[in-house]
Amino acid sequence: MDSLEEDQIEALRKAFDSFDTEKQGFITADTVATILRMMGVKISEKNLAEVITDTAKDGSGQLEFPQFVDLAAKFLIEEDEEALKAELREAFRIYDKEGNGFITTDVLREILQEIDNKLTPADLDGIIEEVDEDGSGTLDFDEFMEMMSG
């Protein structure tokens, strides 16, 4: 539960409670599939069954709220990472004007200055030196992604 925002947990609680109509304190695997689909998570029946088996260790196919949150967190965090990657890919594409598959460290310097105008030239040199490990003077998307996502 630590990996989710408070509002995400609250939304999961509402979904859980609305499907736990008998107030039994658990929901079934079918219900979990329905909730995840309503949240926009795309998952095959096979993958869902595997995840539920991993989460509901007792083999009952019933999930109590903490188990449901743990399961949902896997998908919500994964989705956030995919969205971040898509946004970073778009940003990278904008800066890679020629479509070479890389940006120069000079372009990176400009990006970093736009993000934080308090960075000194020494700060920028340090960041660029750390990110451009091979000293090529360029960054491919993976290096850019790693830098931007920490």
Image (spheres, helix red, strand yellow):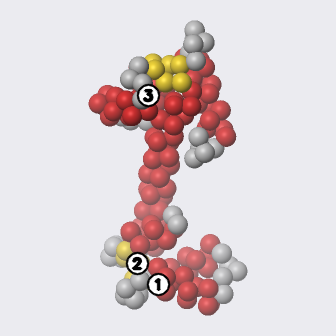
Q: What amino acid type is highlighted by mark number 3?
A: Ala
Q: CA distance from mark 2 to mark 1?
A: 7 Å
Q: What amino acid type is highlighted by mark number 1?
A: Thr
Classed neighbour count for the residue bearing mark 1: other residues with Cα under 10 Å, few (<14), some (14–19), many (≥20):
many
Tell me the SS state at disc 1.
Answer: helix
Among numbered discs 2 and 3, the one appearing first in the sequence: 3
Q: Is residue 85 above or below residue 13?
A: below
Q: Which residue is mark 3?
A: 56
Q: Is residue 20 above or below residue 43?
A: above
Classed neighbour count for the residue bearing mark 3: other residues with Cα under 10 Å, few (<14), some (14–19), many (≥20):
some
- Residue 139, which numbered label? 2
**Residue 34, quarter of the rendered image:** top left
- Residue 44, which numbered label? none
Q: Which residue is mark 1?
A: 105
Q: Is residue 105 above or below residue 22?
A: below
Q: What amino acid type is highlighted by mark number 2?
A: Leu
Q: Is residue 23 above or below residue 133?
A: above
Circles 2 and 1: CB distance less than 8 Å? yes
Q: CA distance from mark 1 to mark 3?
A: 48 Å
Q: Is residue 124 left or right of residue 62?
A: right
